[in-house]
């Protein structure tokens, strides 16, 4: 019986690997760019690879590079990363209802590999998901991101010093690239980005807060205000219908 279960899990693992190939391919260029920018920011190859291994979150890692370049403290970086990735709690809770029952340790391990992309693939699969499938899906995505980061750093190390320094502008271009697709989804995202930028500018120019805490405060305030406005709009519509 145990042999049958082992063979089945192996088959499910391969199925997960196959499902994650497209994700892995998509991660490679983004990971390469991250590694290259990490080199220009001043991180070592060990720090770059370790960040990808421990954080494993593209947008947060790019944001961290910007904060590190500004000399932001570790507490502000961790807090900002937590805020940006808080949606992962919802994704994990959703998948928890879809995966088969298994030991807690197994769920903890493969839940670390949940990203927007792996969640989308897993959530659209019919029926219950096996532990083997989740390990295969998340492992190939994780491996491509970590290895791509290291390779990107190695490529960056081989570039001329002048070109390495000029590559720092690519960090801001990457942020724009991450923001624009979200802005197309609605006015809410545009308003959120603009409001956060305004708050951050005020906090920074008035020197009320340090650069790191200004970003954290601006992110929290803008998110809370936008959600309050959304709640008020929904209540207004309900009252209007009544």
Image: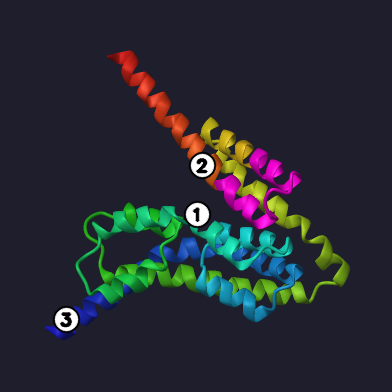
Is 153 placed left or right of 106 in the picture? right
Q: Nearer the viewer, residue 58 or 232?
A: 232
Q: Is residue 26 visible?
A: no
The extreme left residue here reads 1
- Disc 1 is placed on an element classified as helix
Image quadrant assignment for residue 61: bottom right
Q: Nearer the viewer, residue 23 or 241?
A: 241
Q: Are marks 1 and 2 in contact (CB under 8 Å)?
A: yes
Image quadrant assignment for residue 218: top right
- Residue placed under numbered mark 3 in the picture: 4
**Residue stretch rendered in magenta on the structure:** 197-219
Kindly identify the residue that appears in the image at 40 percent across and 30 percent down. Answer: 231
Q: What distance separates the C-alpha of mark 3 from that of mark 1?
A: 43 Å
Q: Local crowd at mark 2 within 10 Å, few (<14), some, or many (≥20)?
A: some
Q: Local crowd at mark 3 within 10 Å, few (<14), some, or many (≥20)?
A: few
Q: Which mark is residue 223?
A: 2
- Disc 3 is placed on an element classified as helix
Q: What distance separates the C-alpha of mark 3 from that of mark 2?
A: 50 Å
Q: Which mark is residue 83?
A: 1
């Amino acid at each position: 019986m145990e042999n049958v279960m082992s063979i089945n899990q192996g088959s499910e693992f391969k199925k997960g690997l196959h499902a994650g190939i497209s994700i892995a391919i998509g991660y490679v260029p983004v990971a390469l760019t991250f590694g290259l920018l990490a080199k220009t920011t001043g991180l070592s190859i060990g720090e770059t690879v370790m960040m990808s291994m421990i954080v494993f979150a593209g947008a947060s890692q790019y944001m961290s590079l910007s904060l590190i370049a500004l000399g932001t403290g570790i507490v502000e970086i961790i807090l900002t990363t937590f805020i940006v990735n808080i949606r992962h709690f919802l994704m994990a809770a959703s998948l928890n209802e879809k995966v088969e029952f298994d030991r807690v340790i197994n769920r903890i391990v493969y839940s670390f590999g949940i990203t927007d992309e792996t969640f989308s693939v897993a959530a659209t699969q019919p029926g219950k998901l096996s532990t083997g499938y989740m390990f295969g899906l998340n492992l190939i995505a994780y491996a491509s991101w970590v290895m791509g980061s290291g390779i990107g750093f190695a490529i960056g190390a081989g570039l001329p010093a002048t070109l390495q320094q000029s590559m720092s502008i690519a960090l801001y271009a990457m942020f724009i690239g991450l923001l624009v697709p979200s802005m197309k989804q609605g006015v809410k995202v545009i308003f959120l980005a603009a409001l956060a930028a305004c708050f951050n500018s005020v906090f920074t120019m008035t020197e009320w807060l340090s650069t790191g805490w200004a970003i954290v405060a601006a992110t929290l305030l803008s998110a809370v205000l936008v959600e309050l406005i959304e709640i008020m709009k929904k209540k207004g519509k309900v009252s209007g219908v009544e």
